[in-house]
Amino acid sequence: MSTIPSSGPTAAPAPLSVGEPDAATLARTAEQSAVTALTTATPHRLADVVPAPQQVQPDPTADWVLPADAAIVAGADPAALAVAEQLAELLRPATGYPLPVTEAAAPAHGIALVLDRTAADLGPEGYRLDVTTTGVRLTAGTATGLFHGVQTLRQLLPAAIESPTPVAAHWALPGGTITDAPRFPYRGAMLDVARHFFAVDDVLRVIDHLARYKLNHLHLHLTDDQGWRIAVDSWPKLTTVGGTTEVGGGPGGHYTTADYARIVSYAATRHITVVPEIDLPGHTNAALVAYPELAPDKLAPPPYTGTEVGFSYVDPADERTYDFVADVLGEVAALTPGPWLHIGGDEAFKVTGEVYTGFVERVQRIVADLGKTVVGWHQLAPAAHLDGRVLQWWGTNGEDPTTAEAVHRGARLIVSPGNHAYLDMKYAPDTPIGHDWAGLIDVRKAYDWDPGMHVTGVPSTAVIGVEAPLWTESVTSLADIEFLLLPRLPAIAELGWSPRATHDWNGFRDRLAGHGPRWDAAGITFHRAPEIPWPSTPAIPGQRRTIPAGVNPT
């Protein structure tokens, strides 16, 4: 309601008496009062987070609204300041607020990030988020924990916070405390850049999707029959020849060492570890085209742009092969600060028995000598155990005595069941892209299983985590990638992060539904899965999401 000024002379304002609030304080008080009047209830509950937090203690009397003059305080630790700046960069576009990052003492109306390296109870990735009427305090023992807490804070704000341009909104946070930490230390997704090549910026966008949902590993499938995607200085034709093809006959492409370093660095700033895969001994046609001396018959095969598997392999009886493996893995290891080197090992149908296990055992030792931990698809299981070895299980039947026996010899497991976690599977029979060899995977199928109990005879203590692979034989664009990732990626993320006691399909689908408007606001493609009760009102009026060619928007 507006006031009508008097027609008489304007009286001079009375001076402030001693102790009376200043103009800035009065403005903040008025803003908070206006928000209280206009928003009788915070639009989000404290528990409306994906993945579901470990512990939630709501306080309906403690809701807080981000004011225009808020600051983000992080102390003097550079790691905390870096996360604080990331938070500011997330919040500035939609709010239009300056949100300065400072080392000063926490303001009564701001957000404080506290890096307490003595907070052992929170673990290496955990955090505690406290929202009160006077501000927000985010505490963690590591910068990684602070970063994960930032993702939770982000989700508790209205969906319009994802807008790249200013939006008129009341930026309310529900009051209370969240204490949170992950169930599994390894939570990841895989992007196949070999069947179809994807530019660096596309990979960075995928990294951002992983970070939103507290996933901490990006597995890059860098080599296959259709293309070799990473530069190796000692074997240059791997990319100049082997990198020029892809499924369907496209131009392919590859990452220079600088490109790969950019991906690794960008991931690290989001507390994500890159896991490079060089698939051996099979899936190597592109390498054989470039270097025929690696082939069993020493003849160059024709370039391959189809989608069959199992026909190619490097010669396991030739010492030159092991020179090649040592050179390639050595250069990739030197570019990769993370602990893992993935050596593939699947679908080598023409290398069998003792020849196969002998090859694997020798390559495992090469990896160990480089100071890395070997990871491979579960077909590596019959080979002799090497300390720290990790098998990635991608079967569709939990009965796998060979893998279980390898675990009893000391192997650890990443679980990626093809019929639950393979995100290149179609949602439904009419999904225009994807496969169905492992079955159809709707959101519930992606959510309703337990990584810790999935493989018979493998105890949960041997499972280090879960990964969602996305193979790209039928995927040709970033929009295609996003359409297949979302909304299933958050389901896999919740399985990896949240305590099993929080697992509840009905609760998850309701929480997930709130992310549709967020993706719309951010311009992210996703599949509007019919089993999710998506809101009918977008976060920003008139906003429309983009749809990949051939994809049915319903």
Image (cartoon, rainbow, N blue to C red):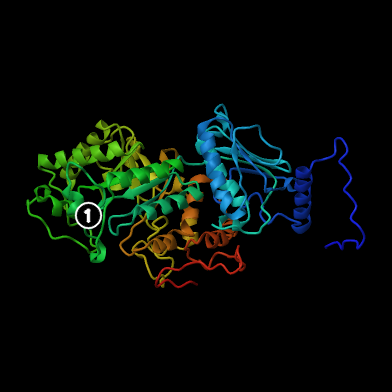
Would you place residue 92 above or below residue 115 in this image? below
Q: Quadrant of the N terminus?
A: bottom right
Please say whether residue 377 is visible from this viewpoint: no
Q: Which quadrant would residue 168 be assigned to in this image?
A: bottom right
| Dot 1 amino acid type | Gly
Of 420 and 402, which appears nearest the observer?
A: 420
Q: What residue do we see at 35% from left, 65% from top?
A: 435
Please say whether residue 523 is visible from this viewpoint: yes
Q: Position of residue 208 (x, y in %)?
A: 46, 51
In this rendering, position of residue 170 left or right of residue 361: right
Q: What residue do we see at 88% from left, 38% from top?
A: 17
- The furthest residue to the front: 9
In this rendering, position of residue 328 left or right of residue 151: left
Would you place residue 226 above or below residue 410 in this image? below
Quickly name the residue at label 1: 243
Q: Which quadrant would residue 170 be assigned to in this image?
A: bottom right
Of 409 and 192, which appears nearest the observer?
A: 192
Label 1 secondary element: loop
Q: Position of residue 129 (x, y in %)?
A: 63, 40
Q: Which quadrant would residue 517 be assigned to in this image?
A: bottom right
Of 509 and 3, which appears nearest the observer?
A: 3
Q: Position of residue 513 (x, y in %)?
A: 57, 61
**Crowding near the residue tagged with mark 1, few <14, some 14–19, many ≥20 C-alpha atoms within 10 Å:** many
- The furthest residue to the top: 118
